[in-house]
Image (tube, rainbow, N blue to C red):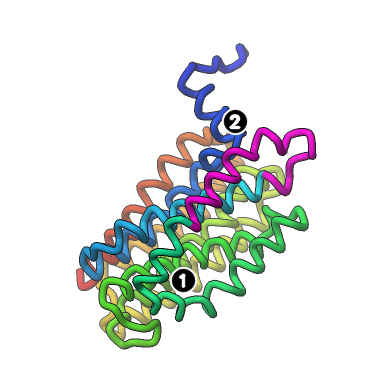
Amino acid sequence: MEPKKMTPKSGVKRSLGAKGWVPGQKGSWGIALLPLLLGCWLAGWHPLFALLIPAWFSAFAFFQVFEKWMKAPSSRRSSLQPAFITWTGLTALLGIPLLVVAPRLLAWAPFFAPLVALALWGVSRGHDRAIATRFSSVLASTLMTPVAASLSLDVYPTNTELGFAWVSFGVLSAYFIACVPYVRSLIRGRKNPRPWIIAGGVLHLLALVGVCCAVWANLLGWSSIVLWVALLARSLIVPLWQARRAKPIPVIVLGRSEIVWSLLVVASLTIPLI
């Protein structure tokens, strides 16, 4: 089989990723941006979103390049330095003014502090792909749904006006966390997928039970149950099907399918009573 040819476009993307300018893992984009954009949508547009969105993107990019920095040998860190300095500076440049004009956002510090600390500790120890590190990163990202909503409504985290934003946080967290073992069973863990399939199936089942409770409480619409039944089936059928194939499912196919599933989950939250 001939080696895959690299196009100029793919070469540029790979170079930017290697130097820390853009996240190397394509799936991380959705985890970083979808919860934030959903929060902006649920509460309605606020002028400060013009600061919040780029500030969060910069913080996310900083974490990605920090991860690369910690993993890289000393000889390679010089190539990461421009991106490291840039994203650190932009995070401060955008984040500090945002906190000055919206000091209530500081009330979210107790929620983020343990998650960020755990993620940074995992990366610094070389455990960036550990389940605990992944879960903490996911939860930090999905917290941006109620954060964005609180900024728009000008309320504290415990305000009842954020009720549905917190429900959305729970659904998105369940989805992205359950995706971790599911994706492992298809890519890094495909040589021994059984434990990952079981873990993914259990997490999807627990999420389905939670969604059923939310529907019963009239917090979500019945379509959410249909969607999560499909997600549970996907978490079992796709890895088992791949195990029977001569070749693994192409990563690009998996990635595009996850984009569709992610958008369906978000759609189920934007039309909550259907």
Q: Secondary structure at mark 2?
A: loop
Tag 2: residue type? Lys
Identify the residue at image location x=49%, y=17%: 7
Circle 2 sits on which residue? 247
140 in relation to 128, above or below: below
Residue designated by label 1: 207
Report the magenta stretch's main SS: helix
Mark 1 in CB contact with mark 2 (< 8 angstroms): no
Q: On screen, 104 above or below 86? A: below
Q: Which mark is residue 159?
A: none
Q: Residue 268 in the image: x percent, y percent?
A: 28, 63
Q: Position of residue 4 (x, y in %)?
A: 57, 17
State which tag comes first along the sequence, 1 or 2.
Answer: 1
Q: Which image quadrant for residue 186?
A: top right
Please report the residue visible at 53 percent of the width from the left and 36 percent of the height from the top.
Answer: 251
Residue type at tag 1: Ala
Is 251 colored magenta in this rendering?
no
**Distance (Cα) linking label 1 and label 2:** 31 Å
* Quadrant of the rendered image containing residue 18: top right
| Residue 185 position within the rendered picture, expressed as x and y whole percent measured from the top left | 61, 50
Find residue 145 and report its image quarter: bottom left
> Is residue 112 rendered to the left or right of residue 119?
left
Could you tell me residue 101's position as x and y percent? Answer: 35, 71
**Residue 168 seen by the camera:** no
- Report the residue that reaches farthest toward the top: 2
Above or below for 35 versus 64: below
Frontmost of labels 1 and 2 is: 1
Q: Which residues are magenta?
A: 69-92
Q: In the depicted view, which residue is nearer to us: 105 or 160?
A: 105
